[in-house]
Image: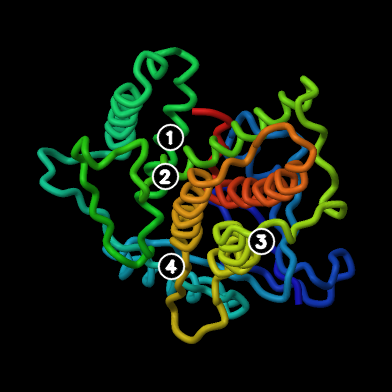
Amino acid sequence: MVWEAPITSTGFSYPLSERGGTATLPEDVICKVHLKNFVEQQGLVGYDPNLDVLLGQGSCCSIVHVVNCEDEFQQQQLDLLWRILDPGAHTALQKHLVCGPVKVTNPSSPLGADQYFQLRRHQMYEASVMKYGELAQDEAWTEVIDTLTAAAIRFEMLSTAHRSQITLDLEDSSISTKGTKSGAFVMYNCARLATLFNTYQQAVEQGTYPPLPPASELNFSCLREEGEWLLLFNYLLPFPDVLQQAAQLPTATKGIRITANTEAVCKFLIQLSMDFSSYYNRVHILGEPFPHLFEQMFARLRLLGAVRDVFHSALDTLHLPPLSQI
């Protein structure tokens, strides 16, 4: 069964026309959308001229309606209206991801998204100046401040389950460059790892240390610190499961609502940062350049290289670039 959605001057035409048994489209195509025609009819500019026909593949469509709790009733109306207008809607699996409200404590006036970002950015700048002094006022810090602000906001928003209410405290004390529950703390520890490996690489280039051997040539049994095995068993090994838990939407469940574990990655990164920070503060990774100490140093570097990769992958799911230094 193939459904084609021809574009008209008002968008998609309804109902969708059935194209059963056509020989012009593959069997697994469920819809055909004429993008180029739509761009021309709407007089849109700036789009790639190579845009033409988009084929939708799969045995059925899956549609997720992301809606705040206050508009859930209206979104359900649109859902049902779609099913009425489109006889083919029975092929679409529609689910609703309901997000809780965002409240501000003691607001003096209504606050928009742009105002909220600027407020958090100013607070992050002031906190950075207090911690790093004049360095934080350098122009090179602009990108760092922006990244720290984005991290603070995303962790503030996403660390709470999506269906729960988020309460924002806009006071200056709610933003910190070192608070263990903040996105800035995660970015700080990611930067510590980058600094560690940059320092090691510079020492290799100067001849102080030999290059890092392949993992297959290392003796990991020399890792005897409890914190090293904690990083392995609590973070490196479970990380794929954390990603699957955070990204998978159980659309096959009964009922109209679905639940996403959007907070899983944030909580994982915060806990990883706390345990890595504790280990890093206690254990000296780059020791004296004596050959009998290299075996343990190399094993630790390989372990922390894997921790760094986990940091980068997890941050990428939040669309946050890792910081190389702070």
Whether residue 201 appears in this view of the structure is: yes
Which SS class for mark 2?
helix
> What mark, if any, has residue 183 been given in the picture?
2
Disc on res. 97 = 4
Indicate the secondary structure of the residue bearing disc 1.
helix
Q: Which residue is mark 3?
A: 5
Q: Amino acid at mark 2?
A: Gly
Work out how far the residue at label 4 is from the one at label 2, CA to CA, in angstroms.
25 Å
Where residue 236 sits, quadrant-wise, is: bottom right
Earlier-in-chain disc, 2 versus 3: 3
Q: Secondary structure at mark 4?
A: strand
Query: In this rendering, is residue 31 above or below 105?
Result: below
Q: CA distance from mark 3 to mark 4?
A: 26 Å
First along the sequence among labels 4 and 2: 4
The answer to whether the residue labelled 2 contacts the one labelled 1, judged by CB atoms less than 8 Å apart, is yes
Where 264 falls versus 212 (above or below)? below
Looking at the image, tell me whether mark 2 or mark 1 is earlier in sequence order.
1
* Tag of residue 62: none
Residue type indicated by callout 1: Leu
Q: What kind of residue is marked 3? A: Ala
Residue at 48 percent across and 43 percent down: it is: 281
**What residue do we see at 75% from left, 45% from top?**
298
